[in-house]
Amino acid sequence: MLTKKLDIIDADRCVGCLSCVFACARRYGEGGYDRSAIAVRSAAGVEKGFVVIVCRACTDPPCAKVCPTNALVAKKGGGVFLNPNKCIGCGFCRNACPIGAVMWDEAANKPIICVQCGYCVDFCPHGVIGIVERQTEGV
Amino acid sequence: MHPNDPLYRVLYIDLTKKIYWVEDRRELFENYLGGAGVAINLLKEECPRGADPLRPENPIVFAVGPFTGLYPIASKTVAMFKSPLTGNLGESHAGGRSAIAIRMAGYGAIVIKGASKHPIYVAVHGDKVFFRDARALWGIKSSITVARIIREKEPGAGQRAIMRIGRAGENLVKYACVVTETYRHFGRLGLGAVFGSKKLKAFVVSGKRSLPVLDKRRYREIYKELFDTMVKSPLMKKYHDLGTAANVIPLNKIGALPTKNLKESKFENADKISGEYLAEKYLGRRLACAHCPVACIHLAALREPYENEPYFYKTTFISYDYELIYSLGSMLGIRNAEDMLKVLDEVEVLGLDGISSGVVLAWATEAYEKGIINENDTLGLRFKWGDYETYIKALRYIVEQPNEFYKALANGVDYAASKYGGEEFALAFGKNEMPGYHTGYLGHFGFLVGSRHSHLDMGGYSIDQKALGKEYNLDELVVKALREEEWRQILSSLVVCFFARGIYKPEIVAKALEPLGWNLTPEDLGKLGAKIHRLKYEFKFREGFDLDSLRLPHRIFETPTPHGYLDEYKFKEMIEKFKLLIQK
């Protein structure tokens, strides 16, 4: 099947403005970035550029594999869906993601999961992130 | 203001007792927004009359505002303190990640009081404050290394600011700066020396939180409108493409680029240190302050071979801006970009204010030419326009202060000239070294009476340029300049970067405040701006500022501006007009 997902187009173009990070939090209609699913930090000093961490929407996601309560479920075409009612906040998913793309909502004690909505892309003025199409076989 | 917005929280840190506490100062923020408006109130509360700027009684205030963390280009932190350079109001703004970090840590302002006996650095991580030993960091050669060490030790990567001083601050050079995120600075008026006097090597802030708004839908809509306007605006293009260095060629063309200590206002080598040239040959990376899509920060990549070691290179990233190209380029007659970048890098490593450093060295060069100082004073250095190697050595001497002459230079150009002579070509206004605009009356008038003696107070340099070829009514323009400075108090209370002043107009600001829970009309904002300006002036008068005894360096009358030669008498008239205006 053909699905759309968020992807890094060119991390070397990142200027570290954090507009994407703030955009993600604005989905909740709030400022700041406590509940953002994107993280941007410098790669050992800003002169070395930036590390941009977004969920890759894995087709066989390790975060869902380790969820003991089936709160995180792999979606058809990639990525995961979170059912917060089932989540017990164990943090296994956060530890299982090798790129650190499972962020944490400290107040709710639950993971912050990218829903691949692409709202952040509209706020990246420098072409770092984008929505791409890909062919997957489903799960 | 939203009742749950943590903006009202003020963090107090006492370096003497190594204690900290948080106070609810809701009334201050409700009346003065944040940033400059709140900081001047906190400074008045904390700084005793006649305080010695380098004694523990001088507080440091950092403040952010209601737009910080909520709207784009609200990227700046306001620092207030008593300036060791001028002995009066010290106010300096910086971006980097400083503003977002303070806001995300959950504070509207931070007040640092007292002084430590031994070197420390302070780390604020959300609600917790840590006093860390910094004895092993004191005296480290480069301000950049200090941050590298702290970066490894402290948590909060991506969400923190690491403000620190170099050896200039440790050694109390009166125009030492505080560096944040390596390439942004609380540059002017000597905050670095105040840090040094408190034995405060660095100040780390980090945090992560949500900020509540009252009308979520409206907030999102207004954000999107603002963002789209910004990225499509000419501002975005100018400052993203070439950065502030784009100003070199146009200012040189109109004869407003101070050159060789303002003996001239055009530089024959301007094209070799221009934004265009630097972008073509050296631009290695562009960066943004946190929450600013413009990304005006330009880093040159300078590749240098090691001598006596073939195929061994180092590549240094050096940030450049218009002001530094003026002060450490044209002012010193530096003829090519590579030489200039090496001087810029040394200023960064030592932690000096680039503008003041350049003006001091320019004065020293002319004083040496005229025989006012000699090689006994300079410890053998022969100052010569364009000789960047001598300038680098002199910068190190200013920081080390091995003799009386370099001690004098470390006190600023006004002091050095009062000791050695050459006051007529010592380019300081209110004891602060001159910014890079010899544009006409309003530029210099702004340096003279602007509340922090900065070109950014009134933007007089811009008023001068816009008036070229048009009516140049000084009486009216004084009013315009003052109104501009008053409005900028609102921008620096929100706190938005002045580069976005064309977007954040009074109506837009009032509209953007609404969904956050503020109810202020453009007229209210105008009145508040004037009120904050007068509060700053009250502090200045309290500390001895006197509009009747201001010194204008004679040099500005000897070199033509785009508006021709300036007349000293006209400045007297402008000051009289200004006095009447601020008494109202």
Image (spheres, coloured by chain):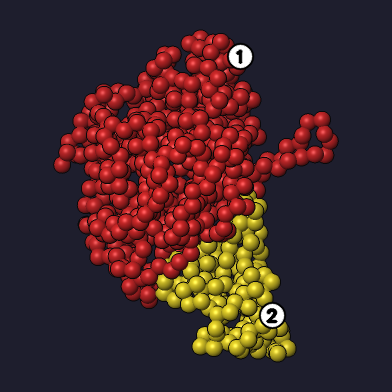
Chain colours: A yellow, B red
Tell me, yes or no, if residue B409 can be seen here: yes
x then y, percent, for residue A66: 67, 83
Closer-to-camera residue (B162/A123): B162
Which amino acid type is marked by label 1?
A: Gly
Snapshot quadrant of residue B540? top left
Q: Quadrant of the N terminus of chain B?
A: bottom left
Give the chain letter at badge 1: B
> Residue A62 shows which numbered tag?
2
Q: Which residue is mark 1?
A: B380
Residue A46 to residue B557: above or below: below
Give the chain letter at badge 2: A
Label 2 crowd (10 A; few <14 / some 14-19 / many >=20): some
Q: Is residue A41 left or right of residue B3?
A: right
x then y, percent, for residue B153: 60, 52
Snapshot quadrant of residue A3? bottom right
Q: Residue at x 67, y 70 (%)?
A: A99
Closer-to-camera residue (B176/A7): B176
Residue A139 to residue B353: above or below: below
Q: SS for tag 2?
A: helix
Residue B352 to residue B411: above or below: below
Q: Quadrant of the C terminus of chain B?
A: top left
Q: Residue at x 62, y 47 (%)?
A: B149
x then y, percent, for residue B315: 70, 42
Alpha-carbon span between mark 1 and mark 2: 68 Å
x then y, percent, for residue B572: 24, 26
